[in-house]
Amino acid sequence: MGRFHAFLRVSGVFGPVLLMGCAARMAPERPAASAADPCETTIIASFFREQGSRPDERFVTDLAHAAAVHLTFLRSIGPHLYVFSVTAPDADPGCREALERLRHDPRVRSVDVDTRRRAHGFSQ
């Protein structure tokens, strides 16, 4: 019976520590933003060269390479206006640096973050 009491004393001291360690191990980790986390956003872009209803794939690839971003064409929203998904290795949640690199390309007329608009006073 002496060993059992010794076990209870040890487990009473170290048991909660072990349980906390197990609980911490089982909790999903949510890492803070780091340099490895890419920025992601959706943009509306227009270009100086006519692109038609869908931008030329080679043009988009070259533009993305020059700005060190990844561009995915999503849709056309009007004459000369295109919506793209943008990702870049920048650790900037708003992708400001990536968007500035795109804006400075001489082929780009404008780049704006695609923000959803809704009427004031209404909630969805």
Image: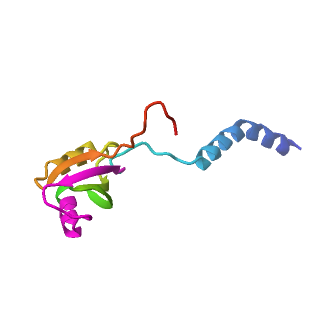
Spot occupied by residue 57 in the image (x, y as percentages of width and height): 23, 68
> Which range is magenta?
37-65
On whether residue 119 falls in the magenta region, the answer is no
Q: Is residue 65 left or right of residue 43?
A: left
Q: Quadrant of residue 52?
A: bottom left
The residue drawn where x is 17% and y is 48% is 103
| Residue 24 x %, y % | 60, 44
Name the one closer to the observer, 40 or 14: 40
Q: Residue furthest top?
A: 121
* Residue at 78% in and 37% down: 9
Would residue 48 be counted in the magenta stretch? yes
Q: Residue at x 79, y 43 (%)?
A: 7
Residue 70: image quadrant is bottom left
Residue 64, position in %: x, y? Answer: 22, 59
Residue extending farthest left: 106
Nearer to us in this view, 95 or 77 = 77
Picture quarter containing residue 119? top left
Q: How many marks?
A: 0
Q: Is residue 114 left or right of residue 98?
A: right
> Where, quadrant-wise, is the N terminus in this rendering?
top right
114 or 103, which is in the foreground? 114
Identify whether 75 is placed above or below 32: below
Residue at (28, 59) in percent of width and height: 71
Tell me residue 12's x, y (percent). 75, 37
Front residue of this view, candidates 37 and 94: 94
Colour approach in the figure: rainbow
